[in-house]
Amino acid sequence: MRLNYPTSLRIIRVPCSGKVDIIHILRAFEKGADGVCVFSCMDGDCHFKTGNFRARKRVEQAQKLLDTIGTGGERLKMYSLGSGDGPPFAKYATEMHEKIKELGPNPIKKHKKNAA
Amino acid sequence: MIIAEKKPIEEIIGYIDDCEKLLILGCNECVTVCEAGGKKEVGVLASALRMYFLNQGREVKIDEITLERQCDHEYLEEIRDVADQYDAIVSLACGVGVQFLAEKYHSQRVYPGVNTCFLGATEERGRWTERCQACGTCILAYTGGICPIARCAKRLLNGPCGGSSNGKCEINPELDCAWQLIIDRLKALGRLEDYEKLLEIKDWSTDRAGGPRKVVREDIQI
Ligand code: SF4
Ligand code: SF4
């Protein structure tokens, strides 16, 4: 397919979206990620049956937490697609890239510099 | 085990907003199993708080330690050398751990990071229910192994109240009537005659009604 998607995205492979925990998401933001997206299989398609449902719940909790601490839950998104779905992946990646560009950098980066 | 729930982060922030150095202290026992105060929850809270402070323009040092238990001297001693380096310690242990920590580190600010709920069991992941109220004089032998103190809303000792209907308790249609459970189990055990025996007036002096309690076992004291 040779589809293009923004180079701002760094892919971290996990065995299943259910492996992604709140702590992984928070650590990414703490290390300065401007946004995080979790790509999962479609509902009902999880090889481990409920991994994607677990991931969704964790994403929702992390979004709330990010809102509370002032980072902003909108910097975290979850998309579901099929394992061979190149075009939607490229589309969602671009969408996320645009969204983050609009939101600007992770606020902790600015403050980290200020504090130093 | 002791069941606890995470406190809202806003509440915790309210306690420690003025601090520059914090320790988040987890416990490896009950609160780890009920996913409220173990190593993972310590990591999540510490990370979220660090980002919260950075978003406020402050770099607050937040360390993470999880002890084997917080209700034993020997484990709490493990933080002896570092405890006074912090402006405050947020303990994710149950109320016992939080208090023992506060007693041991008398001049240190200590805050609870969880709400301690009850003594219960894990029905399934994410669902815990109460089983025992630590009344100090266990009567499970007479009640088919089902506790009317913890599980009957009225703590009745000799059969159900008039509100028991279709096996459910009158205070909540989703709650099993403890006495229905007791009778069903006695039936299954073929010991329904136990139901006929009147339970004596319970000795409540061993319950909380008798004030704070203690257990002293001279046989194991050195
Ligand atoms: S009778 Fe007392 S000790 Fe026994 S299970 Fe009930 S509350 Fe706990
Ligand atoms: S309905 Fe059953 S459990 Fe509820 S208060 Fe009455 S006896 Fe107790």
Image (cartoon, rainbow, N blue to C red):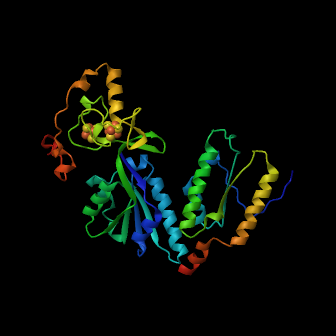
Residue B20 can be seen in this image: yes
Q: Position of residue B24 (x, y in %)?
A: 41, 62
Instruction: Write down the quadrant of residue A8 in the picture.
Output: bottom right
| Labels in figure, total | 0
Q: Is residue A106 above or below residue A11?
A: below
Left or right: where B171 falls relative to B40: left
Identify the image quadrant of residue A62: bottom right
Between A71 and B65, the residue placed more toward the observer is: A71
Taking the image as shown, residue A96 lies to the left or right of residue B90, namely right
- Counting from the top left corner in percent of width and height, residue A74 is at 65, 64
Residue found at the very far top of the displayed protein? B190
Query: Which residue is found at the position 20% from the left and 26% from the top?
Result: B197
Compared to residue A66, the image places residue B121 above or below, namely above
Residue at 63% over, 38% down: A49
Q: Position of residue B12 (x, y in %)?
A: 42, 66
Which residue extends farthest front?
A: B162
Residue B64, compared with residue A105, is above or below; it is above
Q: Quadrant of the N terminus of chain B?
A: top left
Quarter of the image for residue B157 reads: top left
Residue at image x 30%, y 69%? B108
Q: Residue at x 50, y 59 (%)?
A: B44
B221 in relation to B26, above or below: above
- Answer with the quadrant where ligand 2 appears in the image: top left
Q: Nearer the viewer, residue B190 or B47?
A: B190
Q: Is residue B92 visible?
A: no
Would you say A52 lies left or right of B189 here?
Answer: right
**Nearest the camera: A90 or A57?**
A57
